[in-house]
C-alpha cells in the first residue's frame, strides 16, 4: 500500500507542485487549504506524514500542530514556512513538529525529508532484530536506557520523552563519550543520508532534552557540548 501524505497549504500553486512530485514518487496525497480542514483530515485519515504550512487561514500551523499532539497523534509533521524568524521554527519543533523546511525549498530536499521521516516511523514500528552489541539495558551512572520498553530512567524515574528525544539520547548513550557533529546526528538519528542543510533542529531537540534530563539545563552534566564539534553523552 502506498504511503499517504497530507498537504496542508493555502497556496494552490505550491500544493500542485507538492502533489505532482509526491505522486510521481509513488505517494498518495490528501490536500487541505486551511487549518481546521487540515486538522480534521489528519485525525480522520491517519496519513503517514503531514506537510504543514505555518501561515494558514482559520487556524495557523502552530495551532494545528499543538492540537494534533494534544490528541495523542505521533504522525510525523514537517513544517513548511516562508517565515525567517527563528522563534517560529523553534516553536514549531517545541510543539512536536519533527522538522521544518523554508520556502523557497528544493523539491529534492523536501522529498528526501519526507522519505526519511516515514522510514523512521516504519523502523520504529517494525520488529527489530537486536544486534549482538546492543544491550537490553544500559546503565550509565544515574541514567538507565531500557531498549525493550524504549524508555529512559533517571534516578529510577521514567522520563516523559518524545520519540525524537528518545532516539537522540539512546544514540548518544550507546556511544558514551563520543562526540557527534550535528550533521552526523542528522544522518544517524534523523535518518537524513548525506544531509547538507539546516541543522538547528538538532540544537532544539538537545535543548528540550536537557530540560527533561538535566538537574540544571543551564549547566548540563549528561548531554554535553564540545564547542565547535558537536554533542556527546557524559558517562
Image (spheres, rainbow, N blue to C red):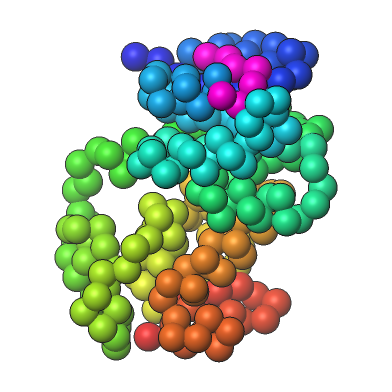
- Identify the residue shown where x is 55% and y is 19%: 37
Q: Is residue 61 visible?
A: yes
Compared across the picture, whether 104 is left or right of 198 comes to right
Locate residue 62, reporting x and y percent: 61, 42
Locate residue 29, reporting x and y percent: 52, 14
Q: Quadrant of residue 12?
A: top right
Figure check: 2 above or below 118: above
Q: Is residue 26 visible?
A: no
Q: Quadrant of residue 19?
A: top right
Locate residue 72, reporting x and y percent: 36, 41
Compared across the picture, whether 235 is left or right of 178 comes to left
Figure check: 82 above or below 219: above
Locate residue 45, reporting x and y percent: 40, 19
Name the quarter where the N terminus is drawn: top left
Q: Is residue 125 magenta?
A: no
Q: Quadrant of residue 123?
A: top left
Figure check: 159 above or below 103: below
- Identify the residue shown where x is 20% and y is 54%: 130
Figure check: 221 above or below 229: below
Total marks in image: 0
Which region is colored magenta?
A: 29-36
Farthest residue, direction front: 58
- Identify the residue shown where x is 29% and y is 85%: 142
- Identify the residue shown where x is 26% and y is 83%: 155
Name the quarter where the C terminus is drawn: bottom left
Amino acid at each position: 500500500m502506498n504511503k499517504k501524505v497530507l498537504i496542508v497549504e493555502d497556496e494552490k500553486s505550491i500544493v500542485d507542485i507538492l502533489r505532482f512530485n509526491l505522486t510521481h514518487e509513488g505517494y498518495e496525497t490528501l490536500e487541505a487549504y486551511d487549518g481546521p480542514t487540515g486538522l480534521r483530515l489528519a485525525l480522520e485519515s491517519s496519513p503517514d506524514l503531514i506537510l504543514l504550512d505555518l501561515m494558514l487561514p482559520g487556524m495557523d500551523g502552530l495551532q494545528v500542530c499543538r492540537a494534533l499532539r494534544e490528541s495523542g497523534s505521533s504522525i510525523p509533521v514537517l513544517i513548511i514556512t516562508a517565515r525567517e524568524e527563528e522563534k517560529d521554527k523553534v516553536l514549531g519543533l517545541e510543539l512536536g513538529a519533527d522538522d521544518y523546511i523554508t520556502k523557497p525549498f528544493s523539491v529534492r530536499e523536501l522529498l528526501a525529508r519526507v522519505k526519511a521521516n516515514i522510514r523512521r516511523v516504519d523502523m520504529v514500528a517494525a520488529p527489530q532484530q537486536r544486534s549482538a552489541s546492543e544491550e537490553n539495558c544500559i546503565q550509565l551512572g544515574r541514567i538507565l536506557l531500557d531498549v525493550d520498553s524504549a524508555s529512559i530512567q533517571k534516578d529510577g524515574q521514567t522520563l516523559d520523552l518524545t520519540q525524537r528525544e528518545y532516539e537522540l539520547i539512546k544514540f548518544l548513550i550507546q556511544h558514551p563519550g563520543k562526540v557527534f557533529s550535528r550533521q552526523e546526528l542528522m544522518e544517524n538519528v534523523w535518518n537524513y543520508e548525506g544531509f547538507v542543510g539546516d541543522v538547528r533542529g538538532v540544537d532544539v531537540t538537545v535543548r528540550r532534552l536537557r530540560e527533561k534530563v538535566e538537574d540544571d539545563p543551564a549547566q548540563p552534566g549528561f548531554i554535553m557540548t564540545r564547542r565547535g564539534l558537536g554533542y556527546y553523552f557524559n558517562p
